[in-house]
Image: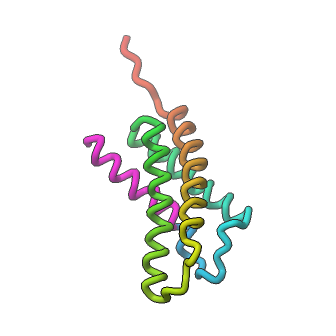
Amino acid sequence: MTDRMKSWLMLAWGTLAAGAIYWPPSYTELNNTDRGFLLQWALAGLVAGGIAQRFLRLRPSRTTALITLGFVAAVMLRVVVETWADPTDHNLWPFEVVIGAVVGLVGGGIGAQCGRLITPTSTSG
C-alpha cells in the first residue's frame, strides 16, 4: 500500500474516531469545553493515533497531523450539516475548530508515539 493511500485511510480513521464522540449528542446537549467530554474526545484521538501508527506505520509526526486533520474534518462536517438545517447554529464555529484541532493534536500525538513504541521493528541478522 502506498503512503498516499495510508494517509487517506488515516485521515478517514481520525475523522471517524472524532465523530464517534462528537456527532451523537445534539448541538444543545454538546458542551465541548466540559472536561469529561474533552477527555473522552482526547482518548478517542489517542486510540485512533495508536492504532493507525501501529498498523499503517507512517512517521509519528505525519500520523499526528492526519489525526488532527481528521478531528478538524469531523467538526467541520457537523458545522456544515447543522448550519445547512439551521443557519443560526454554530455561530462560534472557529472556536469549535480550534478546540477540535488542539484535542486531536494532543490525543493523536500521544497515540502516535504509543503506537510507535508498540510497533515491532525488523531486525536483520
Quadrant where the image shows the N terminus: top left
Q: Of residues 89 and 78, which is closer to you in this image?
A: 89
Q: Residue at x 39, y 58 (%)?
A: 12
Q: Nearer the viewer, residue 54 or 98?
A: 98
User: What stretch of residues is rendered in magenta?
Assistant: 1-19
Residue at horizontal 50%, vertical 52%? Answer: 68
86 up-or-down from 48: above or below = below
The quadrant of the image that shows the C terminus is top left
User: Which residue is at the far bottom?
Assistant: 86
Q: Is residue 78 above or below residue 74?
A: below
On the image, the x and y values in percent for residue 83 come to 47, 82
Is residue 90 located in the magenta-colored stretch of the structure? Answer: no
Above or below for 11 versus 92: above
Which residue is at the far left? 2
Q: Residue at x 28, y 45 (%)?
A: 4
Q: Residue at x 59, y 81 (%)?
A: 26
Depth order, front residue of 58/105: 105
Q: Residue furthest right?
A: 35
- Residue 121 is left or right of residue 91, and the answer is left
The percent position of residue 124, horizontal first and vertical second, equals: 36, 15
Assess whether residue 5 is covered by the magenta stretch: yes
Number of marks drawn: 0
The coloring applied to the image is rainbow
Q: Position of residue 102 (x, y in %)?
A: 59, 53
> Residue 61: horizontal and vertical position, in percent?
47, 38
Which quadrant holds residue 32?
bottom right
For the stretch drawn in magenta, the main secondary structure is helix
User: In the image, is residue 101 above or below residue 86?
Assistant: above
Q: Residue furthest top?
A: 125
